[in-house]
Image (tube, grey):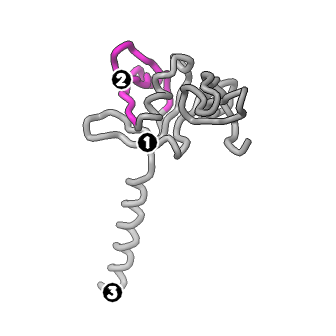
Amino acid sequence: MTRRIFPAFTLLAAVLLRAESQPASLRGKLTQPPGKPPRLTLPSGVEVLLEGDDQTTGVLRDGRLSNADFEVRGKYTPSGSFRILPIYKGAMFVHKDGKRLFVTYWCEVCSIRTYTPGKCWCCQDETALDLKENLDH
């Protein structure tokens, strides 16, 4: 009897661990209070502090995204803030006109796409916010 139960418990434990490690998704209005960490105001009115790597924080502080209908993927930290997945995982989106759009930046001069705002590494012109439906193009 115990030989049959052990594999079932092992499988259940694996499923629970995998479910716990899956990133969560939050959607709300991106707010950028001066001198304070960026936050997401959820439809319920709850404000969640956002954090991430340097490139992610650059996106969160981009004034062009202020008050956007914003979605992030990541995990809650023990302190209650929400840690967004690293920039290379494509975990930030804007919802606009019924579409979920990836946040990207584009240099018109050099045709170079980046995932954080700033100057183009080639020509040093400022990159433009370029929301994309699909990252394949």
Could you tell me how many numbered marks the image carries?
A: 3
First of labels 3, 2 by sequence position:
3
Mark 3 vs mark 2, CA separation in Å: 52 Å
Locate residue 120 relative to residue 23 in the image: left or right: right
- Can I make out residue 45 in this image? yes
Question: Three-letter amino acid code at disc 3?
Answer: Arg
> x, y percentage for residue 126?
60, 22
Q: Which residue was labeled with disc 3? A: 3
Task: Name the quadrant containing residue 102.
Answer: top right
Quadrant showing the C terminus:
top right
In the image, what residue occupies the spot 68% across and 31% down? 99
Quadrant showing the N terminus:
bottom left
Secondary structure category for the residue under label 2 = loop
Q: Which residue was labeled with disc 2? A: 37
In the image, what residue occupies the spot 39% across and 67% down? 14
Residue 74 is labelled as 1
State yes or no: residue 46 in magenta. yes
> x, y percentage for residue 76?
35, 40
Locate residue 15 relative to residue 77 in the image: left or right: right
Secondary structure category for the residue under label 3 = helix
- Can I make out residue 103 in this image? no
First of labels 3, 1 by sequence position:
3
State yes or no: residue 89 in magenta. no
Mark 3 touches mark 2? (CB < 8 Å): no
Is 71 rendered above or below residue 68?
below
In the image, what residue occupies the spot 43% across and 25% down? 40
Question: Three-letter amino acid code at disc 1?
Answer: Gly
What segment carries the magenta color?
A: 27-52
Mark 1 vs mark 2, CA separation in Å: 16 Å
Q: Nearer the viewer, residue 10 or 63?
A: 63
Secondary structure category for the residue under label 1 = strand
Mark 3 vs mark 1, CA separation in Å: 38 Å
